Each structure stands twice: as structure tokens, then as C-alpha cells.
Amino acid sequence: MGSESINIKQTADKIIENVSKVIVGKNEVIRLILAGILSDGHILIEDNPGTGKTMLARAVAKSIECDFKRVQFTPDLMPSDITGLNVFNPKQSSFELVRGPVFTNILLADEINRATPRTQSGLLEAMEEKQVTIDGKTIKLDNPFVVIATENPLETTGTYPLPEASLDRFIMKLSMGSTEKEEEISIIDRYIEENPFEKIEAVCTIDELLEMKKAVKKIFVHACVREYIVDIIMAARGSDRLSGGVSTRGTLSLVRCAQAYSAIIGKPYVDPDVVKTVAPHVLSHRAVSLGGYNASSKNNDIIRKLINDIDVPVENWEI
């Protein structure tokens, strides 16, 4: 397990370094995105327009040598615009499948909450089952298949809230966060003459990514850490500050993300600190706070407070 963790860390470090040529001061966000991808999950990035969400997703995708497609979600977008449809060919007197952008390895769903709920739901089968059904025929998607979606805050004009079923399919919900003065100056310096995105190249092959995904599943999770994770889930479900609990999918997502994050930072086992790091990002969008649906920042604070009130296991987590 140790050598696999080191290999994952080395490759992850190369990807982080590559993306940081374009995105300044967001190494932890990049690390969390990689953890979500290696957990075989999908990522939702929420922040105000112009904060670099789309550029971040594109830079991560470009750093991995695989197929990448982008869909700009708009109110008039239809589910078939994502999945594809059968079109009649008069020359052949038959219908031919025109595959949509969902047939790729990494799909950037840009501003996903600008599309109607009907269109948003068109991604559910693809995200959960890694397949699509078109006119009654089920077609498997490529492996890996990852959706990196961006969304604007609900207060932004022309947005539709993602339904709970859609939110639960995302393994993590992240935010770019604010930038410091020095970081803003660095961004100007990098972009004033040219776009650094044009110069970055892939530093990880699709085969390496698939090997990393297999390896993270072998990261050791001690029984006491498993119980600690379940204690966090139970606390979220029993909290009087949350009107909705966390699903069992959320439990498994937390375990997988903790394994992946541990491997990325070079640990062959999961410790409570890693669980504390990833838990707010894995759980906050799955719970509904009493202050309003989809209040991400408030949910994050509630989850962190719940975690701080739970006893941390002190056993040797390596055995």
C-alpha cells in the first residue's frame, strides 16, 4: 500500500503544480477535486461569476490525457442536447444515433443551475449508473466518466436550485473562495501578456488515472476511524439545526474521499484529521439547514461544529 500511495502523491503533485500555473493560490481546492475524481465521483463547484470555476475545471481536465467536453447550461437546453438522440437518415432509411457530449471522460457542466430542472435531471442516470438510455436503448459510458459542474449562487439572476437527488450525486461541493491581494497581483502578472492555460499539457494518462482509482480503494481505514465517520453521519442526521440528514451514499462518499485524500498527501491509511478535512465538503450539500435550502456556507459551519463536538479516536490508525 505504501508504494501505491507514493505513486498517487507524485502524480497528484504534478497535476496540482500544472493546474496552479493557471489557478493561483487554490492548491487545496485542486487537491479536493482530485480526491473526488479518484473516488469515482463528480464535483460541484459553486461561487460567484468570474472567480475561475470554469478555468479550474478546464485546467484539471487538460492535465489528464483523456477526452473532455464542455456544455454551457442555459434555460433552453434540452436533455437530448446532453445525452444525444436518434436522427433519421433518409439515405439509409434508418435512424442513426448522434451521441451527445456526455460520451466523454470528463464533462464540464458549466453553470449547471441555469438550466431547467428537467434538463438537470437528464444527467442523473449518467452520473449514477455511468450509462444513458436513448429511445429505450441503454448505452454504457466510457471509463472514467466524471462530471465537473459549476454553478452560481442561487441569489444570482436566472438560476434554478438543484434538486436533492441531483445534489446527492455529487461526491463533493467546493467553493473557490476569495483571493488575497498578493494572489490577485500574481494573477495579473501571469495573464497580462498571454493566457497560461494555452501552455499547460497533460501530465497524467488515462491508464494512470484508472490505476490510481484502484489503488485508493486499498488505503487502510481502521475500525475506529470507520466508527468515527459513522458518528459524524449520525450527528448530522440527529442535529436540530438540519432539517434533513445525510444519505447512506453520503457515508460511503466520505469514506472514499478520505481514502483518496490520504493517498494524495502520501498516507497509506486514513486518520481523523483527513476525515475532518473532507467531511464538510462531502456532507454540507446533502443536508438542509433550517436557514434555507442549499445554504452551503451555513451548512459547512454546522457540519464543522458537529465534528468538533465528537470525540476523536486515539488508537493507532495504521494497524
Image (spheres, rainbow, N blue to C red):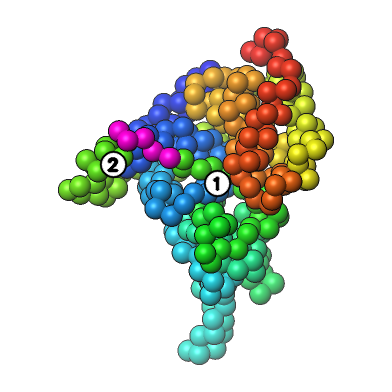
Please report whichever mark, 2 or 1, sits nearer to the chain's N-terminal start: 1
Q: Which mark is residue 187?
A: 2
Look at discs 2 and 1 and give the one toward the viewer. 2
The quadrant in which residue 15 appears is: top left
Q: Is residue 179 magenta?
A: yes
Tell me which residue sits at (62%, 54%) in the image.
Answer: 127
Q: Nearer the viewer, residue 254 or 98?
A: 254
Q: What element carries label 2?
A: helix
Q: Nearer the viewer, residue 55 or 106?
A: 55
Q: Which mark is residue 43?
A: 1
Q: What element carries label 1?
A: strand
Residue 170 pos. (x, y %): 62, 48
Residue 68 pos. (x, y %): 43, 55
Quarter of the picture containing the C terminus is top right
Magenta stretch bounds: 178-182
Helix, strand or loop for the magenta stretch, by majority: loop
